[in-house]
Image (tube, rainbow, N blue to C red):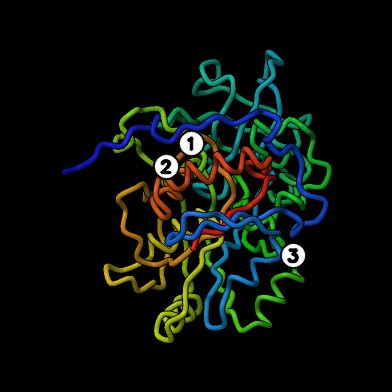
Amino acid sequence: MTIQMKTSDFDYALPAELIAQEPAAQRSASRLMVVRTDREQFEHRRFTDLVDYLKPGDTLVINDTKVIPARLLGVKEGTGARVEALLLKQLDNRRWEALVRPGKKIVVGTRLVFKEGLLSCEVLDSTGYGGRVLQFAWDGQFEEVLDQVGLMPVPPYIRKPLLDRDRYQTVYARLSGSAAAPTAGLHFSDELLSRIKDKGIAVAPVLLHVGLGTFRPVKVEDITRHRMHAEFYEVSAEAAEIISKTRERGGRVIAVGTTTTRCLESAAAADGRVCQGSGWTEIFIYPGYRFKAIDGMVTNFHLPRSTLLMMVAALAGREKILAAYQEAVEMRYRFFSFGDAMLII
């Protein structure tokens, strides 16, 4: 018998003061809750203790995407009305899909101007999810102009200004393209990664550019009716080989974050073998899903009713995850992007 999952089944009460407004003083200074799928009790450690839970022969898989300053504040040409655009997906050299505000007033043909004309665009089309296709114009190198004009796209629940934009970037960020950070990776310092490698644990980078699919809210009660927005992923031949050899020697594959998990599960064959390749994934993981590629996950504490909470519930069990979240609230863990971490093994 199929059990229908509802969005309300993934709700929980969170006091607003537990939403972290800034990063920890040091990257690896966060707390770590350990959720074991074969035990009832939860363990409470520091993030640097992650090393104790990894074994020689395991592989830690990271997402080395780089966040772009994707939030653009500007005005409508002609009226001077304030507008905002969030770049989501690059279509070609000049065209991007974006979310815009105020959406209803930014129609096809509207011109938007940012930073006194350093960057401008015309609205070419609307998308099926309520976004817009924007065609940009600028002088010089786009990346340099965007760096001057754009802001780091921290989530709206973070109301404190981000003083150091590098803190919304992993230390191993490589290829630009994300509209949000793969936040589980923010806890890793170069020193901690060195300790992990020194213990005989491989670290394999894959790529998933974080876009609307990751942070779009679920607006339907029947979760099977929710449709994910496509995100680009890539698994190199080297990463696929490292993961394959890990499996052969009986090691575990531990994914750092939900975006890494989406990448690996999208690239996995039916037998669990992770294949080299790239493409666009719309995979939606919720309870009932059978994981093919991963044995565990490092993750943050996610928003109520979100696809990310549904994914971790698929790995550890809905009741166990909700119990862990309740205990995290009672023990005053910090939640969301700049918050504390969880290890599910």
The answer to whether 93 appears left or right of 261 in the picture is: right
Of 85 and 156, the residue lying toward us: 156
User: Residue sitting at 61 percent across and 43 percent down?
Assistant: 328
- Pointer 2 residue: 229
Q: Nearer the viewer, residue 114 or 208?
A: 208
Q: CA distance from mark 1 to mark 3?
A: 29 Å
Q: Amino acid at mark 2?
A: His
Dot 3: few (<14), some (14–19), or many (≥20) neighbours within 10 Å?
some
Tell which residue pokes out farthest to the left in this image: 1
Going by the image, does 90 lie left or right of 293? right
The nearer-to-camera label among 2 and 1 is 1
Residue 189: give its label: 3
2 or 1: tag closer to the N-terminus = 1
Residue 64 screen position, x and y as percent: 60, 63
Q: Quadrant of residue 204?
A: bottom right
Name the residue: 53% across, 21% down: 103
Residue 126 visible in the shown view:
yes
Q: Are marks 2 and 1 in contact (CB under 8 Å)?
A: yes
Q: SS of the residue at dot 2?
A: loop
The quadrant the N terminus occupies is top left
Residue 148 or residue 286, whichever sits in front: 286
At mark 3, the secondary structure is: loop
Asked whether residue 176 is in view, the answer is no
| Amino acid at circle 3 | Ser
> Which x, y percent locates residue 338?
69, 45
Give the distance between the C-alpha atoms of the residues marked 2 and 1, in whole angstroms: 8 Å
Mark 1 vs mark 3: which is more N-terminal? 3
Q: Count neighbours of disc 2 (C-alpha within 10 A) and say few if under 14, some if 14 to 19, many if 20 or more.
A: some
- The residue that disc 1 covers is 216
